[in-house]
Image (cartoon, rainbow, N blue to C red):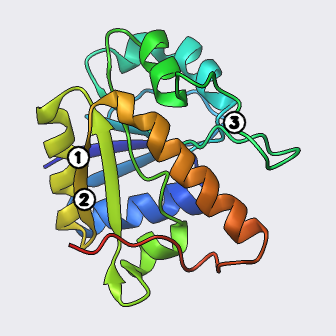
């Protein structure tokens, strides 16, 4: 059985926990007010982008050898008009550099909590796009997601995290501008 540690107890952390628990995984949460041991094989960072550096600094040793999933969208939340990472980088790439002994994946950032919880986007099954450089790690995460009733697609190497973050940025700005619902979003039809 796959075990998950999820940093963050907000909407996304709860929705991700619901999906993987529905598939039979065990889940523990760590919130920002506590320093606890990281026990999960897969660690999901369901936190705002600025929290990544503190988590890497505080928990780096415990994250060594684990699959670490970055779900952040490094959006300028003051202006909602740009990403705050370099044009040739991504939040996931920054995290991978900070955690050289972990396997970093990018996932869940192109879905909203409501579409994870309902497992649908409109009439389509919710799909989680996963980017990373380790095929086995991506497969392990994808299997846990699929077991919970949500589809998962390998989106390529960790270099694709930049495009996933751009897609997440677009979706967030559309929802914040009330052009789409927070219960909607992009669907992948195959």
Q: Are the two marked residues, 2 and 1, in contact with CB atoms closer than 8 angstroms?
A: yes
Q: Residues within 10 Å of mark 1 (few under 14, many from 20)?
A: many
Residue at image point 42% right, 81% down: 118
Residue 99: x and y, percent? 42, 13
Query: Which tag, 3 or 1, sits closer to the chain's start?
Result: 3
Q: Residue furthest bottom?
A: 123
SS for dot 2:
strand
- Check disc 3 and report the residue beneath it: 33
Residue 114: x and y, percent? 53, 75
Mark 3 and mark 1: Cα distance apart in space? 27 Å
Left or right of 96 in this view: 138? left
For marks 2 and 1, give the one nearer the viewer.
Answer: 2
Residue at image point 19% right, 64% down: 146
Q: Are the two marked residues, 3 and 2, in contact with CB atoms closer than 8 angstroms?
A: no
Query: Which tag, 3 or 2, sits closer to the chain's start?
Result: 3
- Check disc 1 and report the residue beneath it: 141
Tell me the tag on residue 152: 2
Residue 184: x and y, percent? 54, 79
SS for dot 3:
loop
Rendered view: 41 above or below 11 = above
Rendered view: 132 above or below 123 = above
23, 124: nearer the viewer: 124
Mark 3 and mark 2: Cα distance apart in space? 31 Å
Report whether residue 36 is seen.
Answer: no
Report whether residue 179 is seen.
Answer: yes
Tell me the tag on residue 91: none
Query: Which tag, 2 or 1, sits closer to the chain's start?
Result: 1
Residue at image point 71% right, 78% down: 179
Q: Residues within 10 Å of mark 2 (few under 14, many from 20)?
A: many
Figure quadrant of residue 44? top left
Mark 2 and mark 1: Cα distance apart in space? 9 Å
């Amino acid at each position: 059985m796959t075990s998950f540690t999820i940093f963050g107890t907000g909407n996304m952390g709860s929705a991700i926990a619901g999906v993987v628990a529905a598939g039979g995984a065990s889940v523990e949460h760590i919130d920002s007010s506590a320093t606890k041991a990281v026990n999960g094989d897969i660690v999901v960072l369901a936190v705002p982008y600025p929290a990544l550096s503190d988590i890497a600094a505080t928990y780096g040793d415990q994250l060594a050898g684990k699959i670490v999933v970055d779900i952040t969208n490094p959006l300028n939340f003051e202006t909602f008009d740009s990403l705050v990472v370099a044009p040739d980088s991504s939040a996931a790439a920054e995290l991978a550099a900070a955690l050289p002994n972990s396997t970093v994946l990018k996932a869940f950032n192109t879905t909203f909590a409501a579409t994870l919880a309902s497992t649908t986007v409109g009439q389509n099954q919710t799909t989680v796009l996963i980017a990373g450089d380790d095929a086995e790690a991506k497969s392990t995460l994808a299997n846990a997601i699929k077991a919970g009733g949500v589809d998962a697609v390998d989106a390529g190497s960790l270099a694709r995290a930049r495009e996933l973050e751009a897609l997440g940025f677009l979706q967030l700005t559309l929802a914040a501008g009330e052009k789409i619902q927070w219960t909607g979003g992009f669907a992948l039809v195959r």
